[in-house]
Amino acid sequence: MSVFSEVSTTDLVTQIARQITAAIVTGQLKPGARLTELQLSRDFGTSRAPVREAARLLESQGLVTFSPRRGFSVRTFGATEMRDIYELRIGLELHAGYLAVERATEADIAALEKQLGRLYETADQTSIETQIFEDFAFHRMLCVASGNARMIKAYDELAMEMRAGITLIGKLYDDPQRMAETHEPIMDALKKRDAEELREALRYHIAVARDAVVALFEDSEKGA
Amino acid sequence: MSVFSEVSTTDLVTQIARQITAAIVTGQLKPGARLTELQLSRDFGTSRAPVREAARLLESQGLVTFSPRRGFSVRTFGATEMRDIYELRIGLELHAGYLAVERATEADIAALEKQLGRLYETADQTSIETQIFEDFAFHRMLCVASGNARMIKAYDELAMEMRAGITLIGKLYDDPQRMAETHEPIMDALKKRDAEELREALRYHIAVARDAVVALFEDSEKGA
DNA sequence: AACTTGACGATTGTCGACAATTGACAGTTT
DNA sequence: AAACTGTCAATTGTCGACAATCGTCAAGTT
């Protein structure tokens, strides 16, 4: 074992993608905004090539859209799109839970309980982004507990889109404390390794989130 | 309404991505094979830029892997990876069926029945690829019938990986006729709009495919 | 006045070249 | 002989430039 740790040599594409992603999910870049390559390359102090590749990467993640000869734009989210995303998440996460009941290790469950604790800890944080981050981390851990790597990848893709959409709305959880509490039935069912109970707990939990998000989107669409 | 139809101006990236994809899913490019940009650009008669972008596109689809400073390689599939993929597909497609029971239009169902007919028609085809293609088309239509656009996208991503993996094995269905027949219970349940029956039909159908594929991969891994 | 045409600026599509890094091989030292 | 070091070919990372295309807007025509 070496005394030294590796030095990071992250390439430009990764760095640029990260920065654009951050700008989108934090709402600094609003949906529909055009991302011209020249402008971005000026901002980053690079040439257009890495910017293009980073943008294509984000396109595959569903954060930006691409039209030939028109370039990249920050993805716009509609109510039906958010409904679709959450609906898919239900199918995904219910199955992750089903698998986790059989496969979750004690370490997995311990990690989930610890994460549940973090939900309560951050409940008084004013930062919505932090709360969302911790909430997503909990659900991601459930996917990890499913023992299915592809499941995690699929969840990450969805989470990115959900995060961008939620940030767009600006608010979601009226009561963070209560939000944390609604994870308890999920935790209980998993600890009991009761597949059916976990299924229902998850279905309810995500459906509530779906309805809240979709309603907010529908309102904002009516208003606009 | 114009007399003329649009002329295609597909850009190089799309064309290149298509060709590489075809080469991978048909097995002409074997897993692990390195894709050097210069070589590819020579083959396609273009510069490296479009090749890089096409390769990154395929990476996001899971067909090729990318390592910094090492470039692109055709993705290698292992037994556990294929198990994960099929497992996720189960969660996905079961939920698609659940939604389709409520949302499928008569046109959706008619399209599915027509596609079922094509399964029988192509059952005597020697080309495995054609059979796989038609089979996948059937299941894709189920996702379409779910009325969830995001579901279709997720399925397409999975299908691409499944197709590449299956082609790698070279064979899958011993009896194409029987393969076609096993779709009947799915069709019946959907026509009856019986959610629970459809769920079980799909679960069984996909689980059989999963077991077959995983077994083939495990054998080939033992052999190698 | 409404429509068509033409030109212009902005932006993307693609290219060829150079710099940086990697992996392998040979040469050298102990 | 083993290990280390230096060199070199191969490949990727990045760049700047040119050509092609699109949207816009003004000018011209009916």
Image (cartoon, coloured by chain):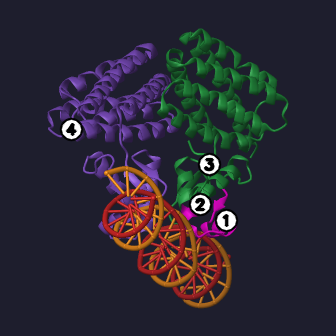
Chain colours: A purple, B green, C orange, D red
What crowding class fits label 2: few (fewer than 14 Cα within 10 Å), some (14-19), or many (20 or more)? Answer: some
Say which residue label 2 marks.
B12
Chain holding disc 4 = A
Dots 1 and 2: beta carbons under 8 Å?
Answer: yes
Q: Secondary structure at mark 1?
A: helix
| Residue found at x 70% / y 16% | B184
Decide which of tag 1 and tag 2 comes sooner along the chain: 2
Say which residue label 4 marks.
A128
Give the residue type that dot 2 points to. Leu
| Magenta region includes residue B45 | yes
Q: Position of residue B31 (x, y in %)?
A: 67, 52
Dots 2 and 4: beta carbons under 8 Å?
Answer: no
Decide which of tag 3 and tag 1 comes sooner along the chain: 3
Chain holding disc 2 = B
Say which residue label 1 marks.
B44
Say which residue label 3 marks.
B4
| Residue A36, placed above or below residue A91 | below
Q: Which of the 4 image quarters holds residue A77?
A: top left
Give the residue type that dot 3 points to. Phe
What crowding class fits label 3: few (fewer than 14 Cα within 10 Å), some (14-19), or many (20 or more)? Answer: few
The segment highlighted magenta reads B32-52
Q: CA distance from mark 3 to mark 4?
A: 53 Å
Q: CA distance from mark 4 to mark 1?
A: 49 Å
Q: Secondary structure at mark 2?
A: helix
